Amino acid sequence: MYRVISLPHDVDTRELRRALWAHRIGHFFTEEADGQVLWLVDPGQREAIQRLVLRWQRGEPLMPQGRPRRARPALPPWLAPFRQAPVTAAALALCLLVFAVMALLGDLVIAALTVVPVGVVKGQLAFGSLAETLGSGQVWRLLSPAFLHFGWMHLIFNMLWLWFFGRQVEALHGSARMLILLLAAGIGGNLAQYATGTVLFGGMSGVDFALLGYVWLMSRRRPADGFFVPQMLVVFMLGWMVFTMTDVAELFGFGNVANEAHLGGLVVGLVLGWYHSRRAR
């Protein structure tokens, strides 16, 4: 990492941030005691970022030159994320909507979104088979468990990682790539979990681990693309995945975790990251 410049806390850096992304310069800001610090991910872009910062300080135009584009109509602040990262924002909004509807309708929502249909027969839970489910046209169930969350902490942490990683993928590799990751990791993680005989599971964490694997691999193999993930975050998330696979996790109330969905999502993210990094090279 290369420290570029320190700015006062009250300086508005939004224009500079947009210009840095537009020029495909990987960076991030941190809040320090003496102000906002701009860091550069790839030292090979040091001269480019210094020129851009100097132009920003002089008040000169920053965006790359090209064909003039028609000005977009202004969006309300709460809709701005849907323009910046539409796939990530839509997935996050859908998770929040499902969580809200679950609070109203309860088990009806869960039964409609589990990987196979769930019902009660003679006072006991009964599950359909995956073959019958797909044969009846309920294809959405391959993905829908990813939008189920069983508590505020489950929801908050999954949305935090989804937003952190998903915005990077959409900003640097486009919304189509993010959609492919979401679908592949969601379905792959759900099938991995279902293969263990589990039906009542849910959460976006399989997709989160896929995004972690993709962003980490891209940051290692193609640092010029601008991807960044703190090393301690990688250690924490992988450590958490391993911890929840042990019997010790049950002692702390973390025994009912979709571990296979996490692992399946991580594998999907690493495979897609490896494929696209090789293709880009």
Image (cartoon, rainbow, N blue to C red):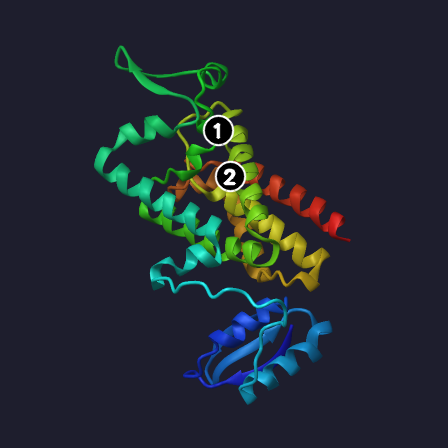
Q: Position of residue 240 (x, y in %)?
A: 51, 48
Q: In the drawing, what numbered circle is on residue 241? A: none
Circle 1 packing at 10 Å, graded few (<14), some (14-19), many (20+), is many
Q: Position of residue 86 (x, y in %)?
A: 46, 52
**Nearest the camera: 255 or 65?**
65
Res. 242 in view: no
At mark 1, the secondary structure is helix
The image quadrant of residue 222 is: bottom right
Res. 213 in view: yes
Looking at this view, name the residue that lies furthest to the top.
122
Q: Quadrant of the N terminus?
A: bottom right
Q: Residue, x 51% and y 41% (percent of image)?
A: 206
Query: Which numbered mark, 1 or 2, is in the foreground of this view?
Result: 1
- Tell whether 280 sits left or right of 201: right
Q: Position of residue 75 (x, y in %)?
A: 37, 62
Three-letter amino acid code at the position of disc 2: Thr
At mark 2, the secondary structure is loop
Q: Which residue position holds label 1? A: 142
**Nearest the camera: 121 or 19?**
19
Looking at this view, name the residue that lies furthest to the left.
104
Three-letter amino acid code at the position of disc 1: Leu
Q: Are marks 1 and 2 in contact (CB under 8 Å)?
A: no
Asked if residue 91 is positioned above or below residue 3 in the image, the reply reads: above
- Tell whether 102 sits left or right of 178: left
Q: Position of residue 58 (x, y in %)?
A: 56, 89
Sequence-earlier tag: 1 or 2: 1
Q: Residue, x 53% and y 28% (percent of image)?
A: 191
Q: Which residue position holds label 2? A: 246
Asked if residue 40 is positioned above or below residue 124 in the image, the reply reads: below
Looking at this view, name the residue that lies furthest to the right.
281
Q: Alpha-carbon distance for marks 1 and 2?
A: 27 Å
The image quadrant of residue 69 is: bottom right
